[in-house]
Image (tube, rainbow, N blue to C red):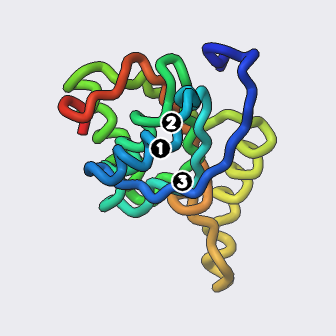
Amino acid sequence: YELSDPANNDIACKRLLWNHGKHGAEECSQLTANNTQPYQLCLASDCTHFQEFHAALAATIGRLLSVGGICILCQPKRANSLDRFMTLIDAMNAAGDLFEMTLHERYDDRLWKMHQDYVAEKAKVRAEGGSVYDPSIHYPHLLVLRKRKEYSEDVHT
């Protein structure tokens, strides 16, 4: 993936409480105030498991990413939680094609091999009464969102 402006490589890390309402819009606006442009890259890990926060997370990503910017979410499936988040992104896209969305399951050969080995041993470990590898909560998928257009509070929230 390429960023829209690789020359602008300032890095910032901020604590941000997601909110899909007016408070969230104001907090995101403060992060990009004072001539600071929206972010070209956002990274998130293990953030989709609480489904009650999906709308707030999606709104926050939409508000903070620049057009052409990408958000990489490293997420296990967590039963159907990741799928439900992707369904929400699809719904936002139906209201105005906001994100290009790509899910990567096999993105690193070494990690994929480990995953396959753990899955193969799962039955053996379970039979012996040991801890069990559960791909639904242990194997991370990469969900990549590329922002296609400006986020609109009226359309996408």
Q: Are there few (<14), some (14-19), or many (20+) residues within 10 Å of tag 1?
A: few
The image shows residue 147 at horizontal and vertical percentages of 45, 23
Query: First in sequence: mark 3 or mark 2?
Result: 2
* Residue identifier under label 2: 33
> Height in image: 1 above or below 64?
above
Residues 74 and 130: in front is: 74
Residue at image coords 41%, 35%: 63
Secondary element at image label 3? loop
Query: First in sequence: mark 1 or mark 3?
Result: 1
Is residue 83 in view?
Answer: no
Q: Amino acid at mark 2?
A: Ala
Marks 2 and 1 sit apart, C-alpha to C-alpha, by 5 Å
Q: Quadrant of residue 53?
A: bottom left
* Residue identifier under label 3: 76
Q: Quadrant of the C terminus?
A: top left
In the rendered structure, find residue 41 and report the number of the disc placed on it: none
The image shows residue 139 at horizontal and vertical percentages of 61, 54
Marks 1 and 3 sit apart, C-alpha to C-alpha, by 31 Å
Q: Amino acid at mark 1?
A: Gln
Is residue 66 in view?
Answer: yes
Residue at image coords 41%, 55%: 18
In the rendered structure, find residue 30 and report the number of the disc placed on it: 1
Residue at image coords 55%, 23%: 69
Q: Are there few (<14), some (14-19), or many (20+) residues within 10 Å of tag 3?
A: many
Marks 1, 3: nearer the viewer: 1
